[in-house]
Amino acid sequence: MAEIRDFNRNQYLLKGGRHKIGKTEGTDRDKKSMDNQLARHRQIKFYIVLGVLVFAAAVVFVLYLHWKSMEYTDYVVVQQTEWIRATDSKSISFGGTLFTYSNDGMSCTDTKGKMIWNQTYEMQNIIVRTCKKTVAVGDYNGRNIYVANTQGMLGTINTTVPIRDFCVSSNGVVAAVLDNGTITSICLYNSTSGELLVEFTITMSNSGYPIAIDISSDGSQVAVSYVKAENGKITSSIGFYNFSSVGKNYIDNLVSGYGYAGAIVPEVHFMNNDTVFAVADNRLMFYKGKQKPESVSEIMISEEIQSVFYDEGHVGLVFYNTAGGTTYRVEIYDTNAKKVSDIAFDMEYKEILFASSGIIIYNENECILYDWGERLKYQGVFQEAVYCLIPGGGISKHTLITDSAIQQIELQ
């Protein structure tokens, strides 16, 4: 009887065990089915989202191509503010504002026509130099330099020797070439206090005469172009001076220099704190180095340069278009000395501006706009004479300065 009970018990346990195993298999199948459904749902959702993103990207791409190929034919004045231009004054775009100067004074106005500041003086032969949002105004052969930014006056520098040339950094340091006929010197000033920071004398026998000068944005470096006659031949050189702690280890703070036989170098400019370009009558030169600029590129030029325009990222050289078809062409180079644009145009120009959205060529009566792909975006005449154009944030919105108004325009 015991064996029968054990047998029955075993049969019961076996049956119960088989029942439990079958229940687990069913649960696993249900779980797998639910997992499969969730996976399919996620997959469908993924493809829907992907399809929407692809469609949106396609729409954006089509709109981008349309925008790229769009050419504007006219413009409308969306806002106009009355503004009276002083007689014999000149106006330039200045850090997003309007800077106006004459022999009697200077002023800064925002694009809505509100005067930010003004300063009176008396000058005969005005020199104006800018760096980002800082401007310096002085009188050739005079003894005063007025320095300001877009917020207000920074100070006045008074010299005891006649001013021949000068430049200004964005933080208000002024480097001036002073010459009393017997001694030529280069002096650095703090425009806020008027304090003389550095002075060194130039000798014709060693360096030559300074014909161009520029200062880095932070005021730590100065580049000077010299010219002198040797044995009946013209020789030019460019000297780089560093007035930081690095330059103290060099005689007269002269950290590097380069000579150019048979050439005159009337233009030398800092594009930023570590890139300098210079233009001679036969070449375009680039230099790199935040502490000790070194020559990195020379582009030889066989044509006569008509004008030079530049900003922090580009240098533009204007030539007569000898190939024919148009009167002028402008070659534009980036900070790496790479030619990024070569545009031919047939319009007498007052100024060429390099904006983030494109290249603007204009005079008082007409304007041409190209994007950086050299596509023509606009060509037309102004509704009235324009004395200054201030680029807007995009290629279609700009500010025009006329004799009687400040106009916000939008191309159509």
Image (tube, rainbow, N blue to C red):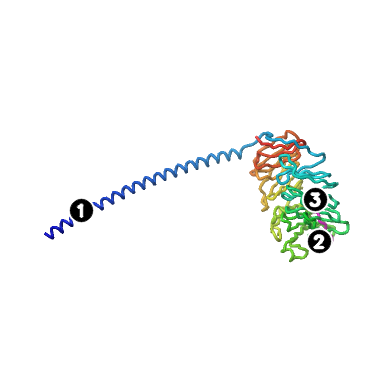
Which residue carries the number 2 mark? Answer: 200
- Looking at the rendered structure, the kind of residue marked 3 is Tyr
Answer with mark 1 or mark 2, whichever residue precedes in sequence. Answer: 1
The residue drawn where x is 25% and y is 52% is 20
Q: Which mark is residue 146?
A: 3
Which callout, 3 or 1, points at the residue further toward the start of the chain? 1
Q: Which sits earlier in the primary sequence, circle 3 or circle 2?
A: 3
* CA distance for labels 1 and 2: 109 Å
Q: Which element carries disc 3, helix, strand or loop? A: strand
Residue 273: x and y, percent?
A: 70, 56
Whether pointer 3 and pointer 2 mark residues with C-beta atoms closer than 8 Å, the reply is no
- Write down the residue under mark 1: 15
Which SS type dominates the magenta stretch? loop
Quadrant in which the C terminus is drawn = top right
Judged left or right of residue 105, residue 1 is: left
The picture quadrant where one finds residue 352 is: top right
Q: Residue furthest left?
A: 1
